[in-house]
Image (cartoon, helix red, strand yellow):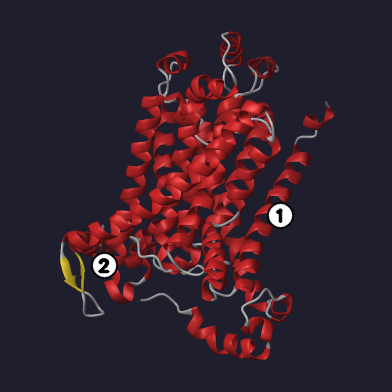
Amino acid sequence: MDACGMTVLGSVLSTFGDGLDFIVRERTGRGGGQVGGPAENARLVWEHLKLCVAAMAIACAVALPIGLWLGHTRRGAFLAVSVSNVGRAVPSIALLFVFFAFLGAGFLNVTLALALLAIPPILTNAYVGVVEADPDAVDAARGMGMRGPQIVRRVELPLALPLVLGGIRTSSVNVVATATIAPLAGVVTLGDPIINPSIYGQEGRLGAAILVALLAVAAEAALAGVQCAVTPRALRRATGRPRRGRLIASPRRRVTTTP
Amino acid sequence: MSMPVPLAQSGGGFFRDRAADSCVADNGICPGWILDNLDRYTTPLAQHVFLTVTSVAAGFVIAFALAVLAHRRRWLVGPVTNVTGILYTLPSVAVFFLLLPITGRGSLTAIIALTAYTLLILFRNVLAGLDGVPEDARDAGRGMGLSDRALLWRVEVPLALPAIMAGLRIATTTTVGLAALAFFAGAGGLGEPLEAQKAFKTNVLFAGGLCVALAVALDAAILLVQRRLTPWTRAA
């Protein structure tokens, strides 16, 4: 590598070093206040997670019952599938700003926007999971005298669980990513140093970007673990691949082999 | 190097418009304002189309090559899926800023990030399409004396087209949504006017609506191409 290449590489590495330094060490920000360091970053991560968990809780509370019910009754196939297609076409930032413009800034409004963003994959996956549950198992349950809600709770839901969690996982990663731009609508999260470099400096922007990326990967890995753990052992063995749920995790990632 | 401040730049004109129009002053939904200010959206829309088409095209070339390789050498499937899966997980805003020290502000940074997002979807669909080709069709091709290369292009790829095109549609719609964040990388796109007047209802609805319309239009265009390319799927 020539001298010029070395210089460029050196400056890139030192820029990333500054970013990492922001994560572990407090410094005086451009605005004069103290920024960065473990305490502040931990607070930002906490705010970030709080927003994500709140949004996911609302999304699950809304989407799971609807998806399971639609799947159980075999109704609304078109609705259940097209909701995720429409959801994919709406940019997260547009949704955030529509809520901001119509409802104003604030934790609750941003939470609702993120929840709305999270609903389609959860709903579609819950629906598909129940619809694809082994009809023989459902028949057997009915033959044993189970009623509708019992069948849903004790047969269809356990069989659909890997797919249900796949939807929750897709949405969670998406929500963690989108919570990064929440400061644009007045909620401070890990995105704050990214969006306001005038306060945190360029190293803050880079440090926060690294943290957000790690957070998303951690969320993905954690939920993949949960998904794997709740997949009934029989299903794992039947396919010979413990991560079957992962491969067909979500409509976004789902391989569509038919048009 | 700091973020452009479109509000400050366009603010003067924007607030003058507001004074002239009571609907805008009330922050209502004003079709008249849209008609008067369409020119605010033309350049961002063009940038948005450029970013989407370039990224999906680049992603398709890479993913297609990887899928063809992995189709022959199965051990590649795991590593490629894992790497593209991690790329897919990284939040786009974070990726834009992680790339900035390396590639600088501009379309290139945005296109690299957006391309990375399409890889997982496209790779999986192309691979699933190739894997779904009936063995009989392959045998027939070989029996006709086709070489491996000819078999790929004249038998396997045509039969895999529905799955490939389905992947392209998903990747394109997803990329239209992500490209709305490309303004963070200094690449423009519809996110720029969206963010510039984010409290103005007319603006957020119209700019957001343009994104959705673009996604639907590109989706329909790909569907149309697919119909032309696979006439046999309609015969039955």
Q: Is residue B106 left or right of residue A35?
A: right
Q: Is residue B161 above or below residue A46?
A: above
State the residue at coordinates (39%, 43%): B86
Residue at 64% over, 82% down = B24
Could you say whether the residue bearing mark 2 is in a helix, strand or loop? helix
Q: At which x and y percent is residue A70?
A: 63, 33
Q: Is residue A63 left or right of residue B33?
A: left
Kind of element beneath mark 1:
helix
CA separation, marks 2 and 1? 40 Å
Q: Look at mark 1 in the image and give the residue it sits on.
A: B217
Three-letter residue code for mark 2 = Glu
Q: Which residue occupies the foreground of this view, A186 or A13?
A: A186
Q: Residue at x 77, y 30 (%)?
A: B233
Residue indicated by mark 2? A203
As shown in the figure, which amino acid type bears the numbered disc 1?
Ala
- Residue B178 picture location, percent across and down: 52, 56
In the image, residue B217 sits, relative to residue A228, either above or below, namely below
Is any part of residue B152 visible from this angle? no
Instruction: Tell me the quarter of the picture where residue B75 sits.
Output: top left
Q: In the rendering, which numbered label is found on residue B155?
A: none
Q: Which of the 4 image quarters holds residue A127?
A: top right
Residue at 45 percent across and 60 percent down: it is A108
Q: Quadrant of residue A99?
A: bottom right
Residue A230 at x, y percent in the picture: 39, 25
